[in-house]
Image (cartoon, rainbow, N blue to C red):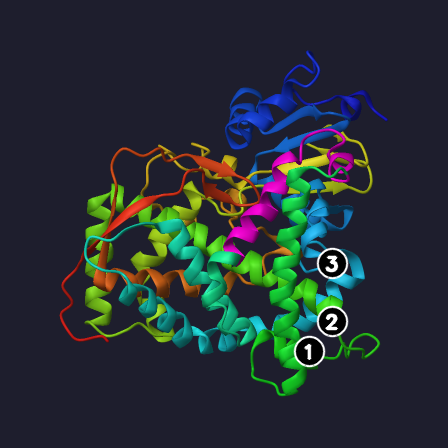
Amino acid sequence: MTTAMAKLPPGPSSFPPGRSLFGMQRDRSGYLVGLARDYGDIVYFTLGAEKVFLINHPDYIRDVLVTHNRNFIKGRGLQRAKKLLGEGLLTSEGEFHLRQRRLAQPAFHRQRIAAYADQMTEYAVNTRRRWQEGDVFEIDREMMRLTLAIAGRTLFNADVESEADEIGAALTDAFELFNTITIPFSELLEKLPLPSTRRFQRARERLDATIYRIIAEHRASDTDNGDLLSMLIHARDVEGDGSRMTDEQLRDEAMTIFLAGHETTAVALAWTWYLLSQHPEVEARFHAEIDEVLGGRLPTAEDVPRLRYTEMVLAESMRLYPPAWIIGRRALNDYEIAGYHVPARSLILMSQYVTHHDARWYPDPEHFDPERWRPEEKEQRPRFAYYPFGGGPRVCIGEGFAWMEGALVLATIAQKWRLLLEPDQRIELKPLVTLRPKYGIRMKAERREITEQTE
């Protein structure tokens, strides 16, 4: 090995022991932003016994996620997520992952996603009908309820809206498990009868009850309703051994898509409403586009490409507050980045939150500016300066679904309502699996005039 290859990148001192561990526990996203600012595009530090490399240049991120993706498996976080998600698309590896992705892919083809549009709009209408002038609510909870209902109907042909609060609470309890992810020996702590461990077990049982009930209902009807679960039940792996999925495999895939699909979109929508409330000039242009394109009628799949500014608003929101804010990969073999040696088994971190706030790609990066997403500006940035859905062969299978759902929900609700931020509240990040608002976001509904009848 050459001296250059053996050299470690710059990074914080490992003394006193636990320095980085404490920093990550106190403020994960802020600590990583500070590392990139202080040490550059590749940073080395330790978390307990883990050797960790933070990379923050689009070219290095591309090489890990795309060019050399076969040298990496999912990192510590998603390995731990198997306790909840099993061997679903987000956590599985190798040939098994490829097989499951082949079986699920047809449900996310463009034509099938377009067929979901009316149901997305219908549930958004249900939400806006429920609100009354002057209502104050936590918009993140409202969006969780809405996207959960949409996911249940479009992906599983099931009505789970009445269970939204229970499922949301269970999901929060399950995600809290990952708050201990950087603590050494955390796997051992999970085996102890601690309150957090018991809460996680109860949360998993609650979520399993819903998923297995939906699977049983589909099995009993033995009909293909055109939803994702029906497709997965009836799909055969024609490129493999011709087998179908077991109930356990169906459970893992359904749990993954059900939870990951609705959670990330809800988080993106909540932050978007918050940002619109703080930038009236952007909000006015956003409302003007909706009124001009739709003329008072409800949006359809055909309208989504015409809602260009709406898409730019959503894209900029996911730049500032990417719902999936960090990606981890573990190196299977020794690797080299920018002349630095990355030993096998090292953990490589890539943070959308860090990269999306880099002034090299986004001047005045803390400023909310949808104009960054004009085509000519997008073309000037490297591909992986923006990657809210990941990249490479593990890119989020539901990316097209999420973009359509986001645009339709924003347009449908904004036709009737402005959402105003309630004063005197703390808006802070809670970077768990997703980038949730730590204390929620309380907003008040103010009615907008609609030029034509839409309900």
| Disc 2, SS | helix
Secondary structure of the residue carrying tag 3 is loop
On screen, residue 194 versus residue 262, left or right, reads: right
In the rendered image, which quarter is residue 117 located in?
bottom left
Amino acid bearing label 3: Glu
Q: Which residue is mark 3?
A: 87
What is the magenta range? 167-191
86 to 55, vertically: above or below: below
Q: Residue furthest top?
A: 16
Tell me which corner region of the image, top left, top right, bottom left or bottom right, holds residue 375.
bottom left
Distance Cα–Cα, label 1 vs label 3: 16 Å
User: Alpha-carbon distance for marks 2 and 3?
Assistant: 12 Å
Spot occupied by residue 317 in the image (x, y as percentages of width and height): 38, 47
Camera-side residue of 334 and 174: 174
Where is residue 9 drawn, in percent x and y? 68, 23
For marks 2 and 3 on the same chain, the one whose residue lies earlier in the sequence = 3
Asked if labels 3 and 2 touch by Cβ distance under 8 angstroms, the answer is: no
Q: Quadrant of the N terminus?
A: top right
* Residue 342 position by quadrant: top right
Disc number for residue 247: 2
Residue 426 circle label: none
Is 342 situated left or right of 31 in this image? right
Q: Which residue is mark 1?
A: 233
Asked if 360 appears above or below 46 in the picture, the reply is below
Q: Does residue 376 appear in the picture of this structure?
A: no
- Name which residue lies at 41% across and 38% down: 439
**Sooner in the amino-acid sequence: mark 1 or mark 3:** 3
